[in-house]
Amino acid sequence: MRTEFAKLLKTIRKYNPEADTELVRRAYRLADQAHKGQMRLSGDPYITHCLAVAANLTQLRLDTTTIVAGLLHDVLEDTRVTHEELAAQFGEEISALVEGVSHIRALNLPASLPAELSHQQKQAENLRKMLVATARDVRVILIKLADRLHNMRTIEFLPEDRIRRICQETLDIYAPLANRLGMAHWKWELEDHAFHHLNPVMYREMAARVAMKRREREAWLNSTVEFLEQRLAEAEVVARVIGRPKHLYSIYQKIIQQGKDFDQVMDILAVRIITQTVAGCYNALGVVHQLWPPVPGRFKDYIAVPKINMYQSIHTTIMRENGQPLEIQIRTEEMDRTAREGIASHWRYKEGIEKIDPKLDSRLRWLRQMYEWLNEAHVPEELLDSVRRDVGATEVYVFTPKGEVKELPGGATPLDFAYMIHSDVGHHCIGARVNSGMVPLRYHLQTGDVVEILTSKNQTPHLDWLDIVVTGKARTRIRQRLREIGELEPLEDQEPVVKPPPRPVRKPASTVRPVDDETRQKLVRVQGNKGIVVQFAKCCNPMPGHPIIGYITKSPGITVHRAECSHFGVTKRDPDRIVEAHWDGVLGGVTREVGMRVTIGPRPNVLADITNAIRPMNISITRAEYRPGENGDTFFDFVFETTEDDGARRVAATLRTVAGVVSIKQVPPAKLFGART
């Protein structure tokens, strides 16, 4: 053990010559003495785990306080050392960190809980406590991740049922948290260890297939790196180029999600260009795109719009001469360090002087906000589902009408956006404009969308909104409001001593929304046109959700009635003055069928790419056919339903981004499926 401890001290001194090594020695002596006689299931003394956790933290070049807390992270839980003793020897800051890590696992569950529920409630409470501790000091989660990383490296000594439970929890919670905190290397290792034990057959097959062509791929990658270095030097771009293979779980996920074979996955290999300046990044991008054509739809600029975990880089996928796609990432040296170390790269201390990157607090706001609204999720299922959704989702970046960037998980809807802005905006949301056009509330937001929320003071949440939103915050706020207005049963622990009389059975929520005239003017369309000044008939007072018709009058021009208005029906009308009208977007627009014929060139897996492209658009495909055509082309005919006037245009624009699509034509549904047009 002394050899391992000596290595730990050497590493600390290397990146922090001012480190208080005597404090580290004292912590090691206490941990060694407190855990004396305790053994791990591997047969190793328990102190080896404490040293490994501290060593993991030194990889992030963390301060002495965090390293000491890592050495002592289990003494309060697994030994007789008390909080008072720890605070007396090491101070309140270190004892608070150790207690924060310990509290994540310390539970007092009622003995009466059913066995099948107690584990779920235990896991939910663990997550809640972890978020409490992390909201106070983010170093708690860094220590916990370092602890989980070493446990995953030695997990084979546990019973099989515990291995599977811990591995699944690692994939659901800890690997996504490492990703959210920007620690890519820890994320990859956590995922690969979990993958190894949850699916050992597939893991071995993937590892064998990667190793089988390793020399061939390495030679190809090395030649690419050398070629790029030469071309960058000729363009006077100061940079270093690194080739890297993808880790196994990432390859496996792409195979599953894209429905492709191992050899068809785009980015098993990737190249990273590290420059000295931001300008150098864009100069390098210009060199890359002059050498090879970029793959449409595979460019992302995270330098201009950084991820919430502070990650910055340019991603582009290019097509090599041999027809093989290659992912290239371009970033500065500082961005590369942030990508490897995440928030730890902005968490630096000099002994006794706190020096934290001022941007760090804003970057961690999501974590504190997550705790605030998860603290209101009283039901374990709500909390677990919300955390899995929010920490594990990919991100989209959208804009407010004022140009502010907002990050949301992939699959988020305008309702999620509304609740992100404010609970009241969400509660009163009646519709949304995206890029100046009305969209359904179920629309999946895309990176770059400009989102405007329409509200009405008369609007309240509806039960079906829970099926629309994906963020935990929105789900929690909707449930909370539904309980307040009696649409959901109150939680048992919130019921008053004197129970109110039983409520009648809830009727299905009406699609009709009472709104003011200004909002109705925004939402009504006459013969497909919006912005037309209309008046709303007082005889039937049509509201969004009612089927409507228009009638041309002398002043102000068009009067809107309900389609079933009895007064309109019995009054003599000029048929030529009756015009079609409907409500825009989600609030009752007329559903119509649109037919599309997509001509596809000879390219493998293009159908999978087409379906992946249109999946986030929330269109309902009612019929589809994929059949061969002439000259090696194939046709993909499909019919979908939309309430949007520009629905066909948006689908066509999305399909044009898919490589291999030759042409797109809107065809009447009756003429599709076997027809030649």
Image (cartoon, rainbow, N blue to C red):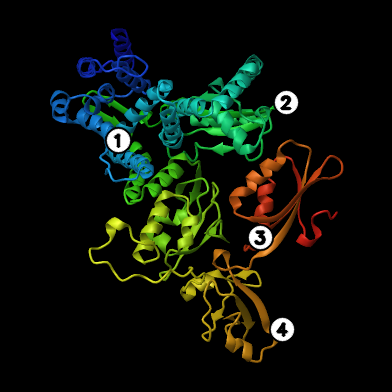
Position of 537 relative to 88 (above/below):
below
Q: Amino acid at mark 1?
A: Ile
Position of 451 relative to 570 (above/below):
above
The residue singled out by tag 3 in the image is 641
Q: CA distance from mark 3 to mark 2?
A: 41 Å
**Where residue 373 sits: x, y (%)?**
34, 50
542 vs 487, left or right, is right
The residue singled out by tag 1 in the image is 104
Label 3 or label 4, whichever comes before in sequence order? 4
Label 1 or label 4, whichever comes before in sequence order? 1
* Dot 3 alpha-carbon crowd within 10 angstroms: few under 14, some 14 to 19, many 20 or more: some
**Residue 350, quarter of picture:** top left
Residue 658: tell me if it is visible. Answer: no
Label 1 or label 2, whichever comes before in sequence order? 1
Q: Amino acid at mark 3?
A: Glu
Between disc 3 and disc 2, the foreground one is: 3
* Dot 2 alpha-carbon crowd within 10 angstroms: few under 14, some 14 to 19, many 20 or more: few
Q: Amino acid at mark 2?
A: Glu
Between disc 1 and disc 4, the foreground one is: 1
| Dot 4: element | helix
| Dot 3: element | strand
**Residue 205, quarter of picture:** top right
Residue 576: give its label: 4
Q: Nearer the viewer, residue 318 or 369?
A: 369
* Dot 1 alpha-carbon crowd within 10 angstroms: few under 14, some 14 to 19, many 20 or more: many
